[in-house]
Image: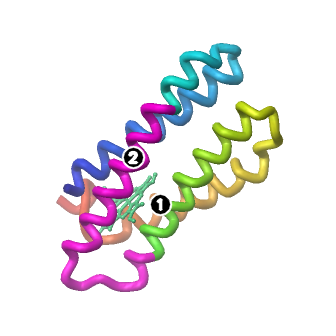
Amino acid sequence: MVHMHITSWILGLILFFAAYFLHTGGNARVSKILHMILRVFYILIIVTGVWILLSLSNINAEYIIKGLAGLWLIASMEMILVRLKKNKPVRSFWIQLIIALVLVLLLGWRLPLGVLHM
Ligand code: HEM
């Protein structure tokens, strides 16, 4: 399940950046399709993340914060793409995305499961 989680969030981030740059580059139609696929990946990321959480025997606050930071990152990606379509400012959400991403990666790699600990 950890592999599935990692694969989902990597593909999710790639889809997000592709959808963002296609939209700013003028290709709104393809960007919209990628955004729809990205929403399926949100579900995959959350389901696999919650699955890992539920299968832990020694769950602590750090795991909970890791999960909340992951949800925050997903919310930031969604807000950026939706506001971009409506031509609203997205700067504050980029700042949130960067903070959430740094938090998620630091905690994710610090915690004992995953590729850095195999
Ligand atoms: C886009 C959002 C997310 C990203 C980028 C992300 C990233 C990561 C990373 C980098 C790891 C560590 C894997 C490794 O060591 O190689 C990880 C593990 C984990 N993630 Fe996520 N995650 C996200 C969303 C979530 C969500 C929404 C939840 C739960 C609600 C969650 C729960 C977990 C748990 C429980 C682990 C295992 C921690 C460990 O012991 O290593 N993640 N995630």
Residue drawn at x 25%, y 64% is: 51
* Residue 113: percent from left, percent from top: 25, 65
* Residue linked to disc 2: 9
Residue drawn at x 39%, y 42% is: 41
* Number of residues whose C-alpha sits closer than 10 Å to that of mark 2, classed few (under 14), some (14–19) or many (20 or more): many
| Amino acid residing under circle 2 | Trp
Q: Nearer the viewer, residue 37 or 21?
A: 37
Please give the range of residues in magenta. Answer: 36-64
Query: What is the CA distance from the residue labelled 2 to the residue labelled 1?
Result: 9 Å
Q: Are marks 2 and 1 in contact (CB under 8 Å)?
A: yes
- Determine whether, in the image, residue 85 is placed left or right of residue 72: right
Q: Quadrant of residue 87?
A: top right
Residue drawn at x 31%, y 49% is: 6
Residue drawn at x 43%, y 47% is: 42
Is ligand 1 less than 8 Å from the beta carbon at label 2?
Answer: yes
Is ligand 1 less than 8 Å from the beta carbon at label 1?
Answer: yes
Residue 41 included in the magenta stretch of the image: yes
Q: Nearer the viewer, residue 34 or 63?
A: 34
* Number of residues whose C-alpha sits closer than 10 Å to that of mark 1, classed few (under 14), some (14–19) or many (20 or more): many
Q: How many marks?
A: 2
- Prevalent SS, magenta region: helix
| Amino acid residing under circle 1 | Gly
* Residue linked to disc 1: 70
- Determine whether, in the image, residue 95 is placed left or right of residue 21: right
Q: Is residue 54 above or below residue 101?
A: below
Q: Quadrant of residue 46?
A: bottom left
Q: Ligand 1: give its quadrant.
A: bottom left
- Determine whether, in the image, residue 83 is placed left or right of residue 15: right
